[in-house]
Image (tube, helix red, strand yellow):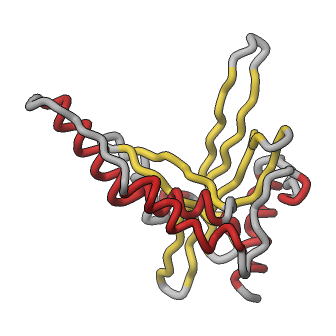
C-alpha cells in the first residue's frame, strides 16, 4: 500500500471516528491546484520576494515591547512569510495553521495532500482534518491528526472544536503512548 492510499484510509478513519463526512475538494469552490505545472506557481516566488523583501517595517523604541515586536517581525519575515506567500500565491493548496507551545506562536504550512475538508460553505472552510506530524519508531509510522470544526451554539456563539488523534500505521493509538504526549 503506497503512502497516498495509506493517508486516504487514515483520513477516512479519523472522519468516521469523529462522525464527520469528507467533502470533495473540487466541490468546495476553492482552487487547490491540480499538481504538475501551475502557471501561477512559476511567478509566485518572484511576486512573494517583491512583496516581502522589498518592504520595510521600522519599529522604534528601546523597551521590552518594541524588542518583542521586532523579534516577531524578524521571525515572521525571515522564517515564514516568504514560503507562506509562495504557497498561497502559487498553488492555493495549503492551509496555514497557527499553533503555540504556550510561550511562542508559530505557523504550520499544511499541503494539499495532508488535509481533507469535512465542512464548508462556499469557499469558506468550516471543518478540516489535518495531518500535523509523523515519525517512524520501531518500524511503525506514527501520524498525528487534528480535526478543527467551527459550530454555532444555541446562544449564537461560535465555537471551534479541536480534536487530536494519533495513529500507528493504520490503527488509532493513545496520544500518551506517542512522542506527542506533552503537546499542549
Q: Is residue 100 left or right of residue 104?
A: right
Q: Is residue 181 shown above or below 152?
A: below
Instruction: Residue at the far right: name it.
Output: 27
Asked whether 62 or 146 is in front, the reply is 62
Residue 113, given in percent of the width and then of the height, sits at 70, 69
Residue at coordinates 74% horizontally, 11% vertically from top-left?
Answer: 155
Q: Quadrant of residue 82?
A: bottom left
Q: Is residue 118 above or below residue 59?
A: below
Residue 32: tell me if it is visible.
yes
Classify the position of the C terminus by image quarter. top left
Q: Is residue 172 left or right of residue 119?
A: left
Residue at x 53%, y 71% (from the top left corner): 134
Residue 181 seen from this side: no
Residue furthest top as drawn: 155
Depth check: 144 or 138 in front? 144
Can you give x and y, in whole percent of width and height, for residue 142 in the image?
A: 56, 72
Image coordinates for residue 179, horizontal then vertical, percent = 43, 65
Q: Is 85 above or below relative to 61? A: below
Q: Work out whether residue 13 or residue 121 is closer to the camera in this orientation and state it.
A: 121
Residue 161 falls in image quadrant:
top right
Q: Please state the horizontal and vertical placement of residue 71, each as a whole percent of the image.
A: 23, 45
Number of dots carrying numbers? 0
**Rendered residue at 23%/41% (across/down):** 70
**Side of 2 where 94 appears, left or right:** left
Q: Which residue occupies 70% across, 73% down?
A: 39
Check the image and name the residue furthest to the left: 62
Amino acid at each position: 500500500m503506497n503512502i497516498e492510499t495509506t493517508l486516504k484510509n487514515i483520513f477516512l478513519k479519523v472522519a468516521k471516528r469523529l462522525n464527520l463526512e469528507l467533502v470533495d475538494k473540487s466541490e468546495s469552490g476553492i482552487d487547490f491546484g491540480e499538481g504538475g505545472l501551475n502557471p501561477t506557481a512559476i511567478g509566485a516566488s518572484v511576486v512573494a520576494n517583491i512583496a516581502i523583501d522589498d518592504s520595510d517595517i521600522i519599529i522604534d523604541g528601546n523597551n521590552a515591547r518594541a524588542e518583542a515586536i521586532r523579534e516577531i517581525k524578524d521571525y515572521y519575515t525571515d522564517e515564514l512569510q516568504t514560503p507562506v506567500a509562495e504557497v498561497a500565491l502559487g498553488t492555493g493548496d495549503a492551509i496555514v495553521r497557527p499553533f503555540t507551545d504556550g510561550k511562542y506562536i508559530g505557523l504550520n504550512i499544511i499541503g494539499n495532500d495532508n488535509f481533507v475538508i469535512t465542512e464548508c460553505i462556499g469557499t469558506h472552510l468550516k471543518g478540516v482534518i489535518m495531518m500535523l506530524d509523523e515519525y517512524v519508531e520501531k518500524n511503525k509510522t506514527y501520524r498525528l491528526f487534528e480535526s478543527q470544526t467551527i459550530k454555532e451554539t444555541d446562544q449564537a456563539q461560535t465555537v471551534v472544536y479541536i480534536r487530536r488523534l494519533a495513529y500507528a500505521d493504520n490503527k488509532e493509538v493513545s496520544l500518551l503512548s506517542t512522542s506527542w504526549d506533552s503537546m499542549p
